[in-house]
Structure formats: C-alpha cells, structure tokens
Amino acid sequence: MSDRKIPAAALWALGLTQIIGYGTLYYSFSILVPSIALEFAWPEQWVFGALSASLLVGGLFAPTAGRWADRFGAGRVMTFGSLAAAAALVACALAPGRVSFVLALVAMELASAFVLYSAAFVAIVQIGGARAQRSITHLTLIAGFASTLFWPLTAALHEHLTWREVYLVFAGINVAICLPIHAWLARLSRRTDESASPTPAAVAPTGRAFTPRDRSRVFLLMLGGFAIEGFVLSSILVHMVPLTTALGLGSAGLVVTTLFGPSQVASRLINMLFGGRLAQTWLAVIGATLLPLGLVVLLAMTPSLPGAIAFVILFGLGSGLASIVGGTLPLELFGRERYGARLGWVTAARQFSSALAPFALAMAMAGIGVQPSLWLTAAVGMLGILAFSAIILIRRQPLAHDRVMLTSAN
C-alpha cells in the first residue's frame, strides 16, 4: 500500500464515475417509477418493493465484493463493475415482464457493489493510503452532485424518451465513460504498489487499540448506526420528489429537491475546511443528528416552502456527512488492514436497512398517511445518534492494561 497521495486527476475521474454510478443506478429510479408501474400494470409501491428486494440481495453480496477489492485491487473490481452495471441497465431496458425486470434490478444492485462508494473508497486507500481520509472527503465532495444532476437530467430525458430508452442511454454512459476510467485506475494502482517503498507509512496500521470485547461492541454499534442512517436516507431519497408533492408543494417540490445535492457538497466542503480537528465519531453523531432534525423541521412547518427548503438543506448536510464517515470512521477505528472487507459489512448494514426503507415508507404512507410516517422515520433516525454516541463513550474508557497500571500506581 502506498504512502503517496492519490493524483488529483485520478480523484476527479473517480468522482465523475461516482456521479454517473449513483445517478444511473439509484437516483434516476424514482423519476422512472410511474412509467414502469404503468407499463407493467403494477402499483408503484410494489415497484419500490422490487427495489427493496434488490437492495437486500446487493447487501448480502457487499462483504464479498469488499474482500475481492482487498485481494484483487479495487481498480480491477470497478472495471468489471462498469461492464456489469451497463449489462444490468440493458437488461432492465429489455425486460419483457415483471419477473425479468426484478431480476435485472437485482443485477443492478449487485453491480453497484463493484462501482459505488465502497469500492471507490478502497481504491483511494490502495492508491494513496496514508492520506486517504482527506481524499475520501474530496471524493464525496465531487460525487455529491449526483442527485442534482441526475434528477433533472432523467426527467428531461424522459420527456423525449421512454424509460427503457433512458436506461439504454445510461448503459452507454457507463461503458463510454466509467469503464476506461476504472481500467486506468486499475493500472495506476498496480504501478503505485510496485513503486511503494516498505516504509512504516506504507504499512497498514490496525487502528485504535481496543480490548477484544470493546472491538466487537464498537463494530456492531458502528454497523447499527450506519444501518439506521441507511434506512432514513433511503426511505426519504427514493420518495423525495413525490413526497414534496404530497405535502402540498406542487411543482415547486422538484425545484426544492435540487438543493439536496448542493447541501451535500456544502457539508463536505465545510468538513474539508474545518472538520480536521474533529474525530470521525463526532462527525458521525453530527450527521446522524441532522437527518431527523431535517424531518422535524419539515413536519413542523409544512406546507411552508421555507420549511421544505430548510428540510432539504439539513437533510443534504446530514447525508453528506454520512457519506464521508461511512468511509473514514472504519478507517479511524480499525485501520487499513482488511479495510475493504469491513467497508463491505458497512455497505451490507446500510443496504439491509435500505432494502426495507422505500417499501416500508410507501406502505406506511398508504396506510397511516404521509405526516405520521415521517414522524416515525424521524424517531428511527434518532436511534442512530445513540449508536454513534455510545462509540464515543467506549473510546473514552481506558484500556484494560491502562486500568491495571492505574490501580498498581495507586
């Protein structure tokens, strides 16, 4: 593993592939759902249910994808993932019926494990390990424009193309842009490994020293916190555009949602400039707090347009921090050793909860109404604050041998 910083060109190129990956494989879905449901004569909540099932399968595979990134190199894994993503998008576009469409969605989520943040973060650590945390922040800063670009882009394309044709266009973008970039990153990673000197900075540290019991507790709390964040984020983001309409904002809702991406970017920029003095656990607590806070503001002020704007900004800020600490917190707590595998478990935890979230919120809104469902989502989000706060408390405890030394000294 290298002690060098990842080249700026590689970081910007990787950011572009993240914008395309999240935009084509995730953010575009909610825009296309009404047309998909209409063609297959399927209620929209069941289309979201198909996405939930696909996220669940993708989550099951995430730890394996992380181990492969550790073993074979993230660049190679992402190169394969670009082809797999394009093939899955083509399969969605050509699906003749419900079953084939759901299978294609599953393929999309499997492919996402190879091309989205988890793989990209491992690539950064492998190419420029010693300065990975700052580079991860830079990457999330760039990729934060995915929703801002692809929500209106998908809507604009869909005005002139069918949903099937939109997916074919997205498949072409993955092959034409993402594939060559990931292949280049794979070559760059190999050259970096060959030229890296065996200095202490190049040796993967193991992170903070925990007792075995505390190490397991911290890992489980971290997974729980990320799972809760994944539930809140997925449930709201998938329904963001129709949700603002249901709350009485009308066509202004789509305009308001475009503030989400810039808010993500703003949080990452603020963190990049001023967050260096904060431990990643504190950033995790702040991010987890902003998500339910945004929902509470929305519900307290609805159907006020300023309230909706405040909600999107707060939610975007929280989402931006969540994306950063998803890569940096495991690195700070456990080090670079087996980083890909641990990040795979983080992804699995998020996707397990994300798999349930869109379908659960759709069913809840249909059963008890929009506002009670959002209050319930905010309450769930507050549990994430507790999980990350517990990690801070555990880290403040002295290690067992430190306690023995203190006792002996007394």
Image (cartoon, grey):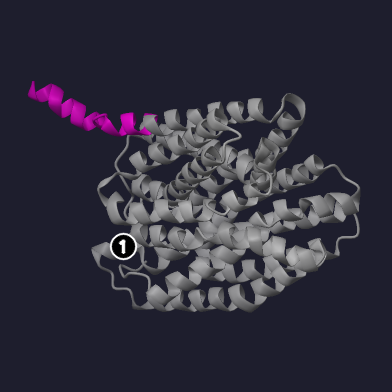
Q: Is residue 41 left or right of residue 253?
A: right
Q: Secondary structure at mark 1?
A: helix
85 or 315: nearer the viewer: 315
Given the image, on which type of amino acid does mark 1 rest?
A: Ala
Q: Quadrant of residue 302?
A: top right
Circle 1 Cα neighbour tier, 10 Å, few/some/many (<14 / 14–19 / ≥20): many
Q: Based on the picture, tell me whether residue 193 belongs to the magenta stretch.
A: no
Image quarter in which the C terminus is found = top left
Q: Quadrant of residue 352?
A: top right
Percent across and percent down for residue 255 are 60, 53
Residue at 60% of width from left, 26% of height from top?
376
Percent across and percent down for residue 39 are 89, 54
The answer to whether residue 342 is seen in the rendering is yes
Q: Based on the picture, tell me whether residue 395 belongs to the magenta stretch.
A: yes
Q: Is residue 322 left or right of residue 99?
A: left
Percent across and percent down for residue 256 are 58, 49
108 or 261: nearer the viewer: 261
Q: Main secondary structure of the magenta part?
A: helix
Percent across and percent down for residue 112 are 63, 58
Residue at 71% of width from left, 43% of height from top?
52
> Which portion, as a residue range, is magenta?
390-410
Instruction: Determine which residue is flagged by label 1.
Output: 130
